[in-house]
Image: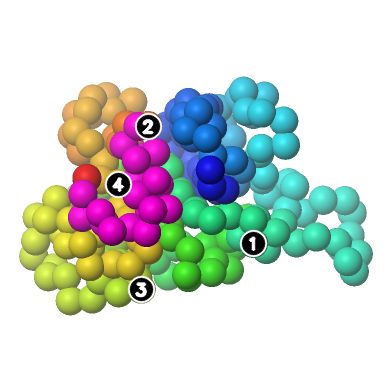
């Protein structure tokens, strides 16, 4: 049983947040969720167990900071043994890659203890996925975790596999091909819930199967 912090961003795939939380709980983990404001458009907060959900609203409570008040993103990163951002949308992926921290979720990432593992499950429209920024951001993030010198010309699958093989404590759960909510068909749908749970558990186990997908 481990403490899993699930980051949720503003992708249609955030509709699966209750299912993902339920699957992690069923696997015996404790779960907290930190969601961006756009993410909240996609799922019913009341579908999560009480006390699970953390947001920008709960990061900035009351009228004014008082000395001694808890700083939510620091508390969350101290609590969590693994941070899985699923779905990670194009916007947040870009922020993580360059270190922007303008909301609770990205502050957790920026304040993260690098000895603890992280998992990213991208989800976006196919053309967003194919945009050069996406692989630039994934390669950059992989390099932050030790996956340096991953060639830029590799096909997506090979690139992600090399990043997963070489990075320490960092795992990409590749998106899958599907008819997307926007009507386009192609790569970009978030991986299935059991695959994300498996990736989280592999990283908690030490990430020795980092290349398995
Ligand atoms: C209905 C709808 C669905 C969206 N789905 C996605 C998506 O699957 N992936 C993505 O990268 N952006 C998607 N977006 C755009 C993001 O919500 C937008 O970039 C937002 O600013 C992301 O903010 P966040 O990263 O702070 O959650 C969607 C927007 C809307 C209105």
In space, the residues marked 2 and 4 are separated at their CA atoms by: 10 Å
Residue 44 position in % (x across, y down): 60, 25
Q: In terms of sequence position, does the residue under pointer 3 or pointer 4 come before the other?
A: 3
In space, the residues marked 1 and 4 are separated at their CA atoms by: 24 Å
Give the camera-side residue of 100 and 70. 70
Q: In terms of sequence position, does the residue under pointer 1 or pointer 4 come before the other?
A: 1
Mark 1 vs 4: CB contact within 8 A? no
Query: Residues in magenta?
Result: 194-212
Q: Residue at x 22, y 36 (%)?
A: 176
- Give the mark toward the camera: 1 or 4: 1
Q: Tell me if residue 204 is in the magenta stretch.
A: yes
Neighbourhood count class around disc 3 (C-alpha, 10 Å): few under 14, some 14–19, many 20 upward: some
Residue position marked by numbered label 1 in the rendering: 78
Residue position marked by numbered label 4 in the rendering: 173
Neighbourhood count class around disc 4 (C-alpha, 10 Å): few under 14, some 14–19, many 20 upward: many
Residue position marked by numbered label 2 in the rendering: 193
Q: Secondary structure at mark 2?
A: helix
Q: In terms of sequence position, does the residue under pointer 2 or pointer 3 come before the other?
A: 3
In space, the residues marked 3 and 4 are separated at their CA atoms by: 17 Å
Q: In terms of sequence position, does the residue under pointer 3 or pointer 1 come before the other?
A: 1
Residue 18 position in % (x across, y down): 53, 27
Q: Secondary structure at mark 3?
A: helix
Q: Residue at x 90, y 69 (%)?
A: 67
Q: Residue at x 82, y 51 (%)?
A: 61
Residue position marked by numbered label 3 in the rendering: 144
Q: In terms of sequence position, does the residue under pointer 2 or pointer 4 come before the other?
A: 4
Neighbourhood count class around disc 2 (C-alpha, 10 Å): few under 14, some 14–19, many 20 upward: some
């Amino acid at each position: 049983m481990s403490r899993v912090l699930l980051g949720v961003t503003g992708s249609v795939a955030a509709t699966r947040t209750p299912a993902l939380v339920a699957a992690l709980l069923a696997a015996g983990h404790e779960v907290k969720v930190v969601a961006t404001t756009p993410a909240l458009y996609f799922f019913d907060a009341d579908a999560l167990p009480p006390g699970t959900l953390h947001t920008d609203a709960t990061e900035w409570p009351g009228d004014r900071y008082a000395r001694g008040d808890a700083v939510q993103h620091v508390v969350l990163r101290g609590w969590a043994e693994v941070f899985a951002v699923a779905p990670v949308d194009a916007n947040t992926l870009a922020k993580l890659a360059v270190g922007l921290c303008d909301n609770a979720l990205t502050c957790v990432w920026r304040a993260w203890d690098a000895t603890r593992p992280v998992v990213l499950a991208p989800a976006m429209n196919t053309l967003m996925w194919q945009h050069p920024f996406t692989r630039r951001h994934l390669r950059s993030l992989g390099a932050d975790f030790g996956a340096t010198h991953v060639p830029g010309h590799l096909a997506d699958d090979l690139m992600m596999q090399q990043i997963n093989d070489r990075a320490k404590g960092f795992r990409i759960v590749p998106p899958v091909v599907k008819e997307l909510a926007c009507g386009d068909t192609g790569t970009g749908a978030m991986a299935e819930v059991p695959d994300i749970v498996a990736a989280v558990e592999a990283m908690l186990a030490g990430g020795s199967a980092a290349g398995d997908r």
